[in-house]
Amino acid sequence: MSGSRIKVLGELGSNILVVDDEQIILDLLKRVLNREGYQVSTVRCADEAVSEIYRGAYDLAITDVDLRSSDGRELMERIGEASPQTAIVLMTGHAEEEVVSFARANAQGLLKKPFALDQLLATVRAALELRGQSTREVDAVPSLESRLRAGVQA
């Protein structure tokens, strides 16, 4: 891994993608997260979100479960396939047990609307830290190729 490309996930300056079909939510989250030092992009639909994930490296995606054009859970799965290193936080105004269970099993965080801004920030930090921990665990296990280059027998 090149030293110039190493980025500790969870640090300020992390790239965040916010997906919601309500412009007011996008504007609010962008303003709050930018003020905290995060780099934020916003999109209003699942297709734009997937395109954006393919275009850039995101540390975190925050997506609403109830998007007009698609289901946020399906979007979360598409993001995971396109960018497995991207942490995901689901937002919902309808916290049915099915959504809560899905989030616990598949996402790094869940925000139940309406949420306080300090809850948003705590959830973002926790999700980035969780993702950073799993990334560091994977990075700590040397690949077979790097071990062979170093002359270590497999």
Image (tube, rainbow, N blue to C red):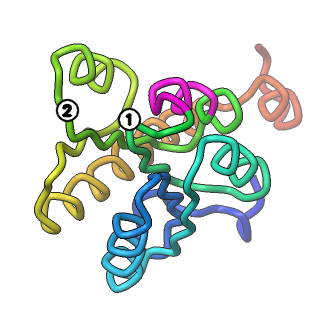
Work out which residue is located at the far bottom of the displayed protein and give it: 35
Q: Which mark is residue 2?
A: none
What residue is shown at x 26% (from left), y 50% (from top)? Answer: 126
| Picture quadrant where residue 69 is located | top right
Residue density around tag 2, few if under 14, some if 14–19, many if 20 or more, within 10 Å: few
Q: Is residue 55 above or below residue 50?
A: below
What residue is shown at x 56% (from left), y 25% (from top)? Answer: 77
What residue is shown at x 14% (from left), y 53% (from top)? Answer: 114
Please state if 12 lies on the left or on the right of 95 as rendered: right
Q: For the residue marked with disc 1, what is the amino acid?
A: Val
Residue 124 spot, x, y in % from top left: 31, 56
Q: CA distance from mark 1 to mark 2?
A: 9 Å
Residue density around tag 1, few if under 14, some if 14–19, many if 20 or more, within 10 Å: many
Work out which residue is located at the far right of the displayed protein and give it: 149
| Picture quadrant where residue 117 is located | bottom left
Q: Which residue is mark 1?
A: 65
* SS under mark 1: loop
| Residue nearer the viewer, 71 or 31 | 71
Residue 154 spot, x, y in % from top left: 76, 13
Judged by its main secondary structure, the magenta piece is helix
Residue 150 spot, x, y in % from top left: 82, 37
Q: Marks 1 and 2: CB-CB under 8 Å?
A: yes
| Residue nearer the viewer, 26 or 142 | 26
| Label 1 or label 2, whichever comes before in sequence order | 1
What residue is shown at x 32% (from left), y 18% (from top)? Answer: 102
Magenta-colored span: 70-78
Q: Is residue 40 magenta?
A: no
Q: Which residue is mark 2?
A: 94
Residue 47 spot, x, y in % from top left: 69, 42
| Residue nearer the viewer, 44 or 153 | 44
Q: For the residue marked with disc 2, what is the amino acid?
A: His
